[in-house]
Amino acid sequence: TLQSALLAGLEHNDNQWKHLLALPVPRRVHYLAKLLVLTGLVLAAFVVLLLLIPVGGWLLVLLKPAFGLHGMPPWPALVKSAAACFAASSLIVTLQTWIAIRWRSFTVAVAVGMSATVIGFLVGQSERFGHWYPWSMPMQVFAGHGEHLPFVVAAGVLGGLAVTGLGLADYLRREIG
């Protein structure tokens, strides 16, 4: 939420969109570049989290040996879970990008993301609706016994592609300035 609002805010401030759109590149490049950078930032966050989980386990071994942790981290399971969470979060990333670029107000982008996240914590606990709500889809990777895993991964990726198309179409037809 914050990253998307800050990325779009760079151009919303001082009407920088006018300067960008005057450059001799197709208009779609600007929207897709913002989306690509935000996706890269989210991917980097998942990689850092993936690398820090074993560090946390190592610290637990040192500080709380009674927990009985030992051996190498289960890398295949960690990578699979991180990849599934990243895929499930694709819809959120594209929605936040569209909202942040569509409305000039930093407050709108942040308010939508924060409100949706809080609602996601509540909806995410529902067995019936948790896997349908975009902001709770990444949590569903770990919920239950993984029965919703294929759905949330597919919905995240396919929904992300659909929202990318809708956001790009909206951006291309809209007057900015």
Image (cartoon, grey):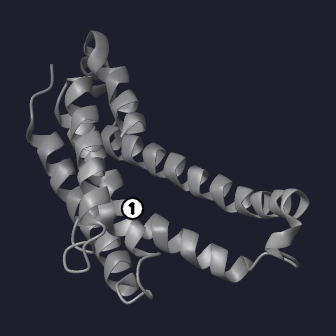
Residue 167 rendering spot, x and y as whole percentages: 19, 49
Spot occupied by residue 146 in the image (x, y as percentages of width and height):
43, 86
Q: Nearer the viewer, residue 48 or 68?
A: 68
Where, by quadrant of the figure, is residue 16 drawn? top left
Residue on which the image places disc 1 = 89
The image shows a total of numbered marks equal to 1
Quarter holding the C terminus is: top left
Quadrant housing the N terminus? top left
Between residue 42 and residue 60, name the one nearer to us.
Answer: 60
In-front residue for pair 17/63:
63
Residue located at (73% from left, 77% from top): 75
For residue 26, say whether it is visible: no
Residue at (65, 74) in percent of width and height: 78
Q: Is residue 25 above or below residue 147?
A: above
Q: Which residue is at 56% across, 69% downward? A: 82
Q: Is residue 158 above or below residue 57?
A: below
> Looking at the image, can residue 89 be seen?
yes
